[in-house]
Amino acid sequence: MKEFDIDLISLANESHDYQHIVDSNFFAMFEHSLVEVGNCNIHVVLKKSETMLICEFDINGTIQLTCDRCLELFDYTISAEEQIIFKYGEQAQELTDEIVVIPRGLATLNLAQYIYEFVGIHIPMKKLHPRFVEEENEEGEENAFLIYSSASAEEESDKNEIDPRWEDLKKLIK
């Protein structure tokens, strides 16, 4: 994972570009990896200032997933842009998903875990082979216009009638 290290001490306060290719060997480094086979190009733009680092990740490539319906393998295309802000502070902590505090004296920053997580969050919850995606969309469109109601027609017309108690309250306002 050394290839994903960024030497922070020698960096000037400006924008820096990094290119990485992550493949099956990269994903194998992570225990219980969600991805076993993949090939993604990662372009990282790191903007360094006195108080923070802004890392913009551009991820493009394919990973191999197993269809939840037929259990066949298929290639899934990932195209994503993510950003993390690293702020300098006293101790390391994660404030939000996008803001991480790093110690002031940190010499190197390893981006491998962040790249792995960004690929992981772009894996769909429901992994469907492309031939099933069209069927799923068509079914979704057909059902999108159905409205289900448990109320009968009489109950609907009763709702339109004004409750006599409201009539008495209206008299008090006048």
Image (tube, grey):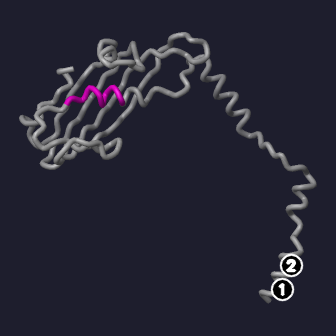
- The answer to which of 85 and 100 lies nearer the viewer is 100
- The answer to which of 90 and 12 lies nearer the viewer is 90
Name which residue lies at 18% across and 48% down: 89
Query: Please, which residue is most extreme toward the bottom here?
Result: 174
Q: 10 Å neighbourhood of mark 1: few (<14), some, or many (≥20)?
A: few
Please name the amino acid that badge 2 sits on. Glu
The answer to whether 55 is drawn above or below residue 19 in the figure is below
Q: Is residue 117 left or right of residue 145?
A: left
Residue 133 in the image: state x and y as whole percent.
60, 23
Residue 41 in the image: state x and y as whole percent.
31, 22
Q: Helix, strand, or loop for circle 1?
A: helix
Query: Please, which residue is most extreme toward the left here?
Result: 10
* Residue 155 within the segment the image draws in magenta: no
Q: 10 Å neighbourhood of mark 2: few (<14), some, or many (≥20)?
A: few
Q: Can you identify the residue that label 1 sits on?
A: 171
Q: Quadrant of the image for the C terminus? A: bottom right
* Residue 116 within the segment the image draws in magenta: yes
Q: Is residue 1 left or right of residue 154?
A: left
The stretch of residues the image draws in magenta is 110-117
Q: Is residue 68 left or right of residue 115?
A: right
Q: Are marks 1 and 2 in contact (CB under 8 Å)?
A: yes
The answer to whether 93 is drawn above or below residue 26 in the figure is below
Q: Is residue 150 visible?
A: yes
Please name the amino acid that badge 1 sits on. Lys
Name which residue lies at 25% across and 22% down: 20
Name which residue lies at 35% across and 16% down: 39
Residue 143 in the image: state x and y as whole percent.
73, 35
Q: Can you identify the residue that label 2 sits on?
A: 167
Q: Helix, strand, or loop for circle 2?
A: helix
Name which residue lies at 17% across and 27% down: 5
Q: Quadrant of the image for the N terminus? A: top left
